[in-house]
Amino acid sequence: MPSRRISFSSPRFRGSGTRQILACLCLLAVSFALYSPSLGFSFQFDDQLFLQDSNVQHGNWRALSWPPAPRFLTWLTFLAQYQWSGPDAAWFRLFDLALHSLNALLVFLLLQHLLARFNGKPGIRLIPALAGALWFATHPVQIESVVYVYQRSTLLAASLAFAATWVWLRRRDEQKLPVVLAGVLYLAALACKEYVVLLPLGWWLMDSRFSQGGRSRPNLWAPLALTGAALLGMVVWIARSPDPTLGFSFSSSHQYLTAQVTVFWIYLGLITGTVPLNLDHHVLPLLPEDPLFWLALGGILSLLLGAFALRRREPLITVSVALFFVFLLPTSSLIPSPDLAFEHRLYAAMLGLAGLVAWATAKLLGMQEQTAGRTLPSRALVNVGLLALLILTLLLDFRTEQRLRVWRDPVRLWSDAQSKSPDKYRPNLNLGVTLMGSEPERARTYLRRALQIGPGQPEAYRSLGQLEWNMGNAEQARRFWERALELDASSAATHTALGQLLASANDFVAAREHLERAITLDPEPLAPYFLLAQLHFRFGFYQETIDWAEKGLQRHSEEAGLWLLLAEAVSAQANWSRAAELYREALRRDPSLATAWQGLEQSLRK
């Protein structure tokens, strides 16, 4: 009697429309279920950069779009979402989770195309592509990109880059519209984040007929020209931009490049699980004088040469390794950055790992099909391989679920980073800052530790000043803030803090000087306007109080405290009818202001 055993590589599992839909639903369900706990997390780290941006808060999209701000498409999404949902972390995270799920689906579709083109067994596509996409979606190294809202730029650029690649792969030789559409999507991805700059080189590689030993397809000058133009534009942009996050300087590029030899092996350790996940890795790069540097560099070159050597026999390996480097290289060699390593830089590069997983799964399924009528040991060996791959996938999910707990709140996140990078400045500083409200003594310990590591960094002095001020130690706070200004006189926040301290000490002249300097440096924040109005009112300068309150209300018209101060100053000038109007404005914005009710009653009685 013939065997009725069903193989996963049989035609029944080769990807009909229904099975495609089921695979997509499975991918979406796993992605959403795994990351859904993050919907309840608070904002983290640099999320305040867009939350406190006045253009985002006030919906001023023109300031971001022309001349284009760095990563302006990403910032436009921040602006639009802020106008719709306000500073609600759950909605921001839901949007990012949807982007990640979309990216997982796009990876699934891309892998099916790559398997059909390079695997040699076009029938075995759905299960391998699903396996690779699951690794992309659930690998714990992806958490930083998915959960850290400020890294939406990474997710959005990946979405557009993957979509552009999918359009490119599906084009016909004589059709120009898909080529143009792919180019437009590529440029849009660049407007989200610059790490996709080498993507057209990946298209060129995917169009190469490795397995047939033939030449590349025609019309490949388009991606090469697009890459060259994008690189040239980026060089000019970075060289002219005052934004330090776009790179230090090209004079530091060679140092950054040599350090990335070490960083590459850290990234490889993160992918394989041999290096612990950390928000702020402390990288001690190997120097060219160290023989280990050349050993590490030789290892990288060996991997590249090995992948190139397999271009005829296993072209999917070659393409997967190439895609990994295409997405990783821009931020790990071409674009210098103050931070040597961040896990979010691996996000899109994980498409390469997904390709390798899909290749391994397809190989095992092909071997299972070939051993269907053979001896038990050969079939068992293949099944053990498939079982091991399944177990590894489940372990990834477990590690991701465990790592998500660390991101639940800033204290957990920075405690984890400080324990893994105890000798790095930023984890100690940020842990101290997050503990200032709840555990001031512990906060002082970590802030002083940060000060020991980076004695020339003003942030630790500013934070220690704020901590001492909160604890009632005004003289110590003053010393710390004055030292912070010696290191960085352009900090509006430090001038404001010192102005507030001096105002409380009734040092009118010095307080006014610092507060006015703060407004000159940054005219947007409310605090210096309010403090200046309050300072002048306390010393009986009512007209100056009115002037500063009105200046503050031009930028912060909803601030009830400023309306109340303005009303009090007008009342002190005995302008009772005007004072009554201003008291009503203050109450309209905050009915709980007891002083405003009393002032209104007094004004009406007068």
Image (tube, rainbow, N blue to C red):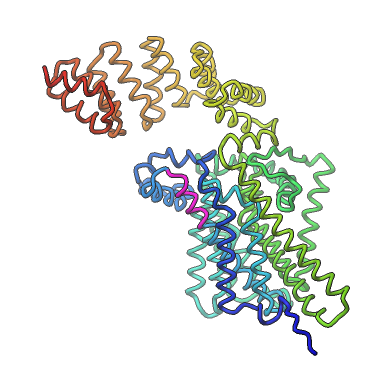
Question: Against 144, is 427 above or below?
Answer: above
Q: Nearer the viewer, residue 487 or 22?
A: 22
Residue 355 in which image quadrant: bottom right
| Magenta residues (range) | 88-98
Q: Is residue 528 left or right of residue 423?
A: left
Question: Against 571, is 161 above or below?
Answer: below
Q: Nearer the viewer, residue 310 or 475?
A: 475
Which SS does the magenta portion mostly show?
helix
Where is residue 365 shown, x and y percent of the image? Answer: 75, 74
In the image as oriented, which residue stretches furthest toward the bottom? 1
Q: Is residue 555 left or right of residue 205?
A: left
Question: Which residue is at a point 79% across and 70% down the rendered structure image?
Answer: 383
Where is residue 501 shown, x and y percent of the image? Answer: 43, 15
Which quarter of the rendering shows the N terminus? Answer: bottom right
Visible residue check, residue 137: yes
Q: Nearer the viewer, residue 448 or 588?
A: 588
Q: Is residue 314 left or right of residue 164?
A: right
Visible residue check, residue 223: no
